[in-house]
Amino acid sequence: MSIADRISRGVSASLGANLLDTLANSLLIVVLARFLLTPAEYGLLFYALSVVGGIAVFGALGIPSSAGRYVTEYGEVDRDQVRHVIRSALSYLLVLSAIVGIGLSAGSGRIAAALNEPGLAPILALGAGYVIFESLRTLVGSVFQGLNRVDLSALVAAVSAVARFVLVVALVGLGLGAVGAFLGYVLGFAVATAVGGTMLYRRFYRTYDPTVPRADGLVRRLLEYSVPLTATRGASVLNKRVDTILVGMLIGPLAVAYYTVGKQVSQVAVTPATSLGATISPTVGEQSAGNQRSRAARIYERSFEAIVILYVPAAVGLFLVAGPLVRQVFGVDYGGAVPVVQAFSLYVLLNAISRITSDALDFLGRARERAIVKTAMAVTNLGLNLLFIPAFGVVGAAIATVITHAVYVGANVVIISRELPVSFDRVARSAAHVTVLSALMGAGVAASLPLVSGIPSLVAVVALGVAIWAALSVASGLVNPDEIRGYFA
């Protein structure tokens, strides 16, 4: 199978599963916010998820990503060593996650007291299950990605999302409130781990020769490479969670609800980029390892161009429809989230670029450099949040995140440009072209916003924006439908 066919199949399968994942998550967000939880309860739930998610990084460190990298490497040169990579990674992960998870549950009361939010205690008491099953699910997904089976990695994520939706709604419906919602998350991870682990064992693990001895230095290499990945993952979690935690500490759970809505909307928009990034990253690493650096660079260039063409108009559109989107979907009680969504519209574009760049650096063996940048930006983000939240409220947290993520993404692009012979001439031309078209599209959307009176009319306005962009893109030659199929050839 050609690289173009492999990427096309991977993106298609991954996008389908990720769309299901996104749909389930989006429905859960809306159902919880609008029907099952009050804004304060909603904020408390995601406050707890941020705290637990921040602690959970110590239950996995960088082991899942390191396992994915060495599954790819050994899969090319010594296939049967993949079995030892999986076994070693699983052993260390189980020990780490159990220690961290049990410690979290045992200290739940003290953590809640330190954060001055007693309502967190019963939720954090369930943290052990979250840490263990989330770590295992991450490992399974990383191994599938390393095996170049991104479709299966995405399927695990989709199973997790669907199970989570059903379980959270059921448990909250039984009157368990935010505690029940959190338990639903834990059980959703457990179901996904069981499904993914079964597929991994049956389709791959048992096909490797168990008599082949483990290569010398395999465990050492696995653990050594996990060190910079741990720094990267820790910095990533700090970046993603610390703002929410600080909003909760400095303002309160209601502000967390507003901030969470804004961030979740921006994350939903990045689904196609997630699928593309998960698919091309192992391929870029594989081509580079095979001394096909020019081919790897071309794959990345084309991916970057696709992101620019898709996400510049998406960012413009999200900024314009933020008001009616929040009011019609989440309700008027969440009006405080509107400026947050607008601030995060630029984050959507930055995050999309990050999705095709960050993981690729790991597969290229440049995790150390990315870790340094990520850590520096995480510390900077912490400082900016402490400065901006008291001055600008919940919007200040969003501004701090956008600023630091912009610097982080820019640095990653520079690093990958030094690793591969990447040329951005074509990307720059496409960026200028799509910016003009996005401005024209935005004018049409802005003129139509006064007509929004409900969800159907909101969908119609969004569809109008998409239609304007598509027509202008094809008419101006920015997008050629006949070339899309072979875009990465």
Image (tube, helix red, strand yellow):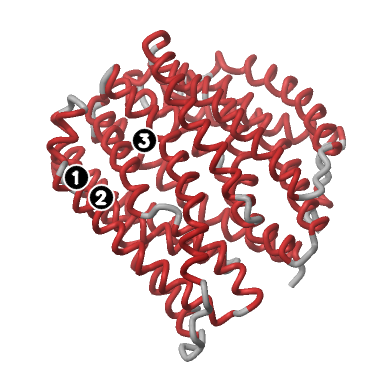
Whether 399 is drawn above or below 239: the answer is above
Tell which tag, 2 or 3, sits nearer the viewer.
2
Q: Residue at label 1?
A: 180
Whether 392 is drawn above or below 211: the answer is above
**Amino acid bearing label 2:** Gly
Q: Is residue 236 visible?
A: yes
Tell which tag, 1 or 3, sits nearer the viewer.
1
**Amino acid bearing label 1:** Gly
Where is residue 217? Give x, y as percent: 51, 72
Q: Residue at label 2?
A: 184
- Give neighbour class at mark 3: few <14, some 14-19, many 20+ (Cα, 10 Å): some
Whether 200 is drawn above or below 477: the answer is below
Identity of the residue drawn at 57% across and 36% down: 373
Whether 345 is drawn above or below 354: the answer is above
Identity of the residue drawn at 24% across and 43% down: 181
Quadrant holding the C terminus: bottom right
Q: Residue at label 3?
A: 30
Label at residue 354: none
